[in-house]
Amino acid sequence: MLQKRHPAIFDRRGDNRSPITTLTRDYPAGHVIPSHFHDRDQLVYATRGVMTVRTGHGAWIVPTHRAVWIPASIAHTITMSGTVAMRTLYLRPRFARTLPRACSVVNVPPLLRELILHACTFPVLRNTVRRQRHLTRVILDQLEIIQAVPLQLPTPIEPRALRVAEILFADPSDRRPLTQICKAAGASRRTVERLFQENVGMTFGKWRQQLRLMQAMRLLAEGAKVTHAALESGYSTPSAFINMFRKTLGTTPALYFRTDAKPK
């Protein structure tokens, strides 16, 4: 579903003098953190489970071994698929100067993963403590070289394109041709294809592929089998889903979520 508009809660985080504060939380499947924003940039990483982050501009699916970067002041919700073990770094605004001022999903290489987990054993990393100061510097070095992952689903703002998006968000497995969906939304196929390209910077076909991939990832995190997740997300065959998953994440769904199941 598209994010409903509710007043966002301001969630102040930590000591303004410290470059990094942390948060460690575990959440049950289906838990939703309501719309809120922080006075700090944040890197949200889960050692288990899949998160879906939504803002007024789109949605980001965050599988295990990836993280989402959310700059300060951006209102967002987070929905948990499967049990989620969340580890979050809150950074003083613009402390990580090379990272974008927009949300993005990023790879978390093994070294950064261990740094995040170690940092989260402290509520605050203080510059006045030598070891914590060194840890902060290494984390910053790693943040400067992380790479984004194409797991974003932008939300169109034009009313006709938005209606098409809402139809498909409600049922990602909808296999009707675009012409039929456009008719239900009160627009022509050609118009909708143009609006998606203008509004979200990708073709409608690519947008629909992203929606299906994200839905399948959520279902897998909730314990679904690969075949069920693929068909329930609108793929014609499980192999089509496996190929798209491998292209995006570099491995098969079975191997990826088998790794996810190991204790951390």
Image (tube, rainbow, N blue to C red):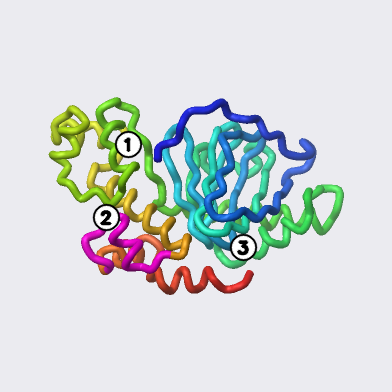
Q: Residue at x 38, y 68 (%)?
A: 225
In the displayed structure, does residue 98 sit left or right of residue 174? right
> What segment is highlighted magenta in the picture?
224-238
Q: CA distance from mark 3 to mark 2?
A: 33 Å
Q: State the residue position of label 1.
A: 166
| Mark 3–mark 2 CB contact (< 8 Å) | no
Q: State the residue position of label 2.
A: 234
Identity, as a three-letter code, of the amino acid under mark 2:
Gly
List x then y, in percent, for residue 146. 53, 55
List x then y, in percent, for residue 224. 41, 64
List x then y, in percent, for residue 105. 48, 50
List x then y, in percent, for residue 34. 57, 37
Q: Residue at x 48, y 58 (%)?
A: 63
| Mark 2–mark 1 CB contact (< 8 Å) | no
Q: State the residue position of label 3.
A: 113
- Mark toward the start of the polypeptide (2 vs 1): 1
Which quadrant would the N terminus be assigned to in this image? top left
Name the element at disc 2: loop
Q: Is residue 233 magenta?
A: yes
